[in-house]
Amino acid sequence: MAHSAGGVTMPPVGRIVKPQTAFAGGVGADVTGLKDIATDAVLSDEVKRFSESNTRFVVEVRPENVSAFRWAFDGLPLSLLGQTVAEKRPRVAESDGEWLIWATLHELKEAWQRPLRW
């Protein structure tokens, strides 16, 4: 969940999918909610994906706890970024719905580790 300018953004429901977590656990994700991020400012998709500050929070919420979570943060803007999936691949869509990333975990792990092999 990201909190920015009085808003809160929920990441993929179930767990936060970091590269290391995805690689180790074989967890995939569909991140399709960039267009829904609550903010007072006009932000590019790049800023929405990578911006970090002390007013931005990312949390994981299990599907059965989403209602209680929303209730606890009632009055703050919430945005669902996506959800975890069984397929071993992350997909990230731009605000316009066009897929920016669609690759298998194996492909991404290989691209990450290849430069480290020497």
Image (cartoon, rainbow, N blue to C red):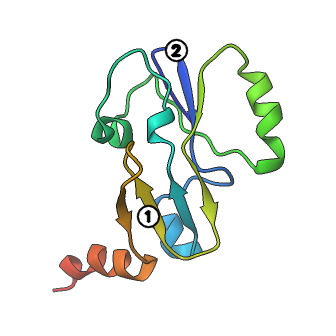
Q: Are marks 2 and 1 in contact (CB under 8 Å)?
A: no
Q: Please report the residue visible at 28 percent of the width from the left and 41 percent of the height from the top.
A: 46
Q: Which residue is mark 1?
A: 19
Mark 2 or 1 closer to N-term? 2
Q: Which residue is mark 2?
A: 6
State how far apart marks 2 and 1 are (Cα): 28 Å
In the foreground, 99 or 58: 99
- Rendered position, 106 above or below 74: below
Q: Could you say whether the residue bearing mark 2 is in a helix, strand or loop?
A: loop
Point out the residue furthest to the bottom here.
118
Amino acid type, callout 2? Gly
Amino acid type, callout 1? Pro
In the foreground, 45 or 115: 45
Q: What percent of the width, then of the height, locates residue 23?
A: 48, 74
Q: Please report the residue visible at 70 percent of the width from the left and 44 percent of the height from the top.
A: 61
Mark 1 Cα-neighbour bin, 10 Å: few <14, some 14–19, many ≥20: some
Query: In the picture, residue 88 is in which quadrant?
Result: bottom right
Q: What percent of the width, then of the height, locates residue 55?
A: 46, 21
Q: What percent of the width, then of the height, locates residue 29?
A: 54, 62
